[in-house]
């Protein structure tokens, strides 16, 4: 299942730089002591209230990663035009700068609220779920108002993104889709759980939209509600015009998910991209680099507490119940493992403090859809440049070292060794991802 392929993933880092370079800190004038003196106390209070709202809005916009999806390579922050490829054509993200003509400068706070909570833009235009309003519907009115205040401080940019492909301009179809798959609803705190758990749930399910990648989708691209966070698939366009598919791991406490992770492993990973259980690579890089890295310790810890409470769910992805791995295959894979992988990941599959993460119990290794496992072997883990991975060594790409059949064999070895369990990978699956 390949929902939305981000064509300009590489754009994101550039967007971040643009933001820094334009000095996007908007300290409203009355925050300076000189101005405050000239204003009567009440308006100074109002102004510092507004400044606080804008700062909160900036933080919430980072939690929702608006920047990543709305900033194309080298362009001004939030000016849109990032391309998403779907099975039925291309979708371009909107310009959400305050330009009144091409952006959302003429929108009221209520317009933004309706777009985020209901997926409907002014004039009744139905939005497409490549914009994760299906998650943002959980976000509170107050948080959306803060995001609105923050977005109004962005420099307005006159730019209209290209039109969507023909089928994706037929927005009336979304009336039906929304009726079938979408229920607008705010986050409901669970009184039986702690305030911390509820905060984590609010962030993960709402602004964090982790489900957008980590929940499997049906043929109409709607998330399968019974399999929330059980692992999804997505596409990324890579330079050269190719599309690379990825699997986003099972985040529940399933044996093929995060069963072996502690809350502290998970907090470390979400905040820094690294824990002794795993390091980030692929499309998760920008989630950490653009969004999670900037959140407070308290919020990250709350998200980890919530995720660790998810009961184990196993997705029923095609292939999950496919043929197991057979004897000769495993032997061939064992030899490749000892020649190429063991020095870092160890014979026991447990990795090491100064070498590499464990493959025993790894969610990437055991995912139903082996796309990320294949990519990490073919292309290496392409770690984000500015995050530190402790003392680990660098894993190099194997695309010029191992054949498709060899990569399938070593994948099968790691998928069936130690206590790992997953269906067999074929050479044809590897060939598709080269
Ligand atoms: C996963 C990618 C993604 C993320 C994250 C995202 N957006 Fe979007 N957004 C899109 C896409 C794609 C569209 C265009 C949808 C369409 O054409 O129907 C869009 C459309 C919109 C629109 C509708 C504007 C219009 O007139 O068409 C608004 C408003 C918006 N986004 C605001 C936000 C805000 C605020 C955030 C952060 C809280 C955010 N988006 C995060 C992808 C994203
Ligand atoms: C754009 C798609 C996308 C979004 C959004 C996303 N993820 Fe991921 N995530 C991935 C992919 C792909 C992987 C597998 C690659 C890797 O392990 O780095 C992954 C890996 C992970 C892992 C590591 C598992 C392991 O065993 O290595 C964790 C934990 C995780 N994501 C948590 C989250 C949380 C929490 C959120 C929401 C705040 C989130 N992800 C949002 C795509 C995404
Ligand atoms: C030089 C040391 C080294 C060698 C050799 C090596 N790796 Fe890695 N591997 C690493 C490091 C370090 C990481 C973590 C990087 C990251 O996640 O960004 C990693 C990550 C992985 C992951 C992702 C695990 C997870 O849960 O996120 C898999 C799967 C993997 N390696 C498989 C292999 C296989 C199969 C081989 C042999 C063909 C191999 N590695 C050889 C160092 C190595």
Image (cartoon, rainbow, N blue to C red):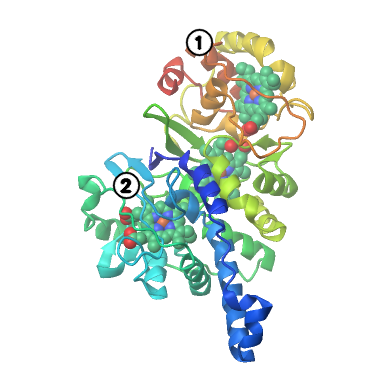
Numbered disc 1: secondary structure: loop
Q: Is mark 1 within 8 Å of ligand 3?
A: no
Relative side of 253 to 369, left or right: right
Q: Is mark 2 within 8 Å of ligand 1?
A: yes
x%, y% of residue 105?
A: 37, 68
- Would you call the spot at circle 2 few (<14 residues within 10 Å), some (14-19), or many (20 or more)? many
Residue 142, placed above or below residue 294 = below
Relative side of 276 to 19, left or right: right
- Would you call the spot at circle 1 few (<14 residues within 10 Å), some (14-19), or many (20 or more)? some
**Residue occupying the far right of the picture:** 353
Question: Which mark, residue 91?
Answer: 2
Q: Residue at x 48, y 49 (%)?
A: 68
Name the residue nearer the viewer: 231 or 434: 434
x%, y% of residue 25?
A: 58, 62
Name the residue nearer the viewer: 322 or 135: 135
Question: Which mark, residue 32?
Answer: none
Taking the image in four quarters, ligand 1 sits in the one at: bottom left
Quarter-of-image position of residue 335: top right
Q: What residue does disc 1 label?
A: 403
Quadrant of the image containing the N terminus: top left
Relative side of 12 to 43, left or right: left
Quadrant of the image containing the C terminus: top left
Q: Is residue 228 visible?
A: no
Residue 394, placed above or below residue 197 = above
Q: Residue at x 55, y 51 (%)?
A: 21
Numbered disc 2: secondary structure: strand
Q: Residue at x 58, y 87 (%)?
A: 43
x%, y% of residue 46?
A: 58, 84
Separation of residues labelled 2 and 1 (CA atoms): 36 Å
């Amino acid at each position: 299942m390949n929902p939305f392929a981000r064509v300009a993933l590489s754009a994101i880092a550039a967007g971040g730089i643009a933001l820094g370079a334009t000095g996007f800190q908007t300290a409203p004038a009355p925050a300076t002591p000189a101005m405050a003196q000239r204003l009567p106390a009440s308006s100074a209070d109002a102004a510092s209230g507004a400044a606080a709202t804008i700062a909160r809005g900036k933080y919430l916009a980072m939690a929702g990663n608006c920047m990543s999806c709305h900033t194309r390579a080298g362009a001004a922050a939030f000016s849109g035009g990032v391309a998403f490829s779907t099975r039925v054509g291309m979708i371009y993200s909107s310009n959400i700068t305050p330009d009144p003509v091409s952006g959302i400068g003429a929108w009221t706070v209520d317009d933004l609220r309706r777009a985020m909570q209901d997926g409907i833009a002014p004039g009744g235009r139905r939005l497409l779920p490549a914009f994760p309003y299906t998650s943002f519907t959980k976000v509170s009115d107050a948080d959306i108002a803060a995001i609105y205040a923050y977005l109004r401080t962005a420099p307005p940019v006159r730019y209209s993104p290209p039109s969507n492909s023909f089928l994706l301009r037929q927005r009336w179809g979304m009336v039906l889709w929304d009726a079938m798959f979408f229920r607008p609803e705010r986050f409901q705190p669970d009184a039986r759980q702690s305030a911390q758990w509820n905060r984590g749930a609010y962030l993960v399910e709402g602004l964090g939209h982790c489900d957008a990648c980590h929940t499997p989708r049906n043929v109409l691209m709607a998330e399968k509600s019974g399999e929330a966070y059980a692992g999804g698939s997505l596409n990324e366009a890579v330079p050269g015009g190719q599309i690379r598919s990825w699997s986003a791991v099972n985040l529940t406490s399933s044996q093929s998910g995060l069963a072996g992770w502690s809350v502290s492993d998970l907090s470390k990973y979400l905040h820094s991209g690294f824990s002794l259980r795993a390091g980030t690579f692929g499309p998760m890089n920008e989630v950490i680099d653009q969004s999670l890295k900037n959140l407070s310790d308290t919020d990250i810890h709350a998200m980890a507490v919530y995720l660790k409470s998810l009961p184990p769910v196993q997705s029923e992805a095609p292939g999950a119940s496919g043929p197991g791995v057979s004897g000769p295959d495993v032997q061939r894979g064992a030899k490749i493992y000892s020649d190429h992988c063991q020095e870092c990941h160890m014979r026991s599959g447990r990795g090491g403090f100064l070498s590499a993460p464990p493959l025993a119990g790894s969610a990437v290794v055991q995912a139903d859809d082996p796309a990320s496992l294949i990519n990490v072997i073919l292309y290496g883990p392409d770690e984000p440049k500015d995050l530190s991975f402790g003392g680990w060594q660098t894993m190099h790409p194997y695309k010029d070292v191992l054949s498709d059949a060899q990569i399938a064999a070593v994948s099968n070895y790691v998928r069936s060794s130690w206590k790992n369990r997953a269906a067999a990978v074929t050479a044809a699956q590897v060939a598709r991802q080269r």
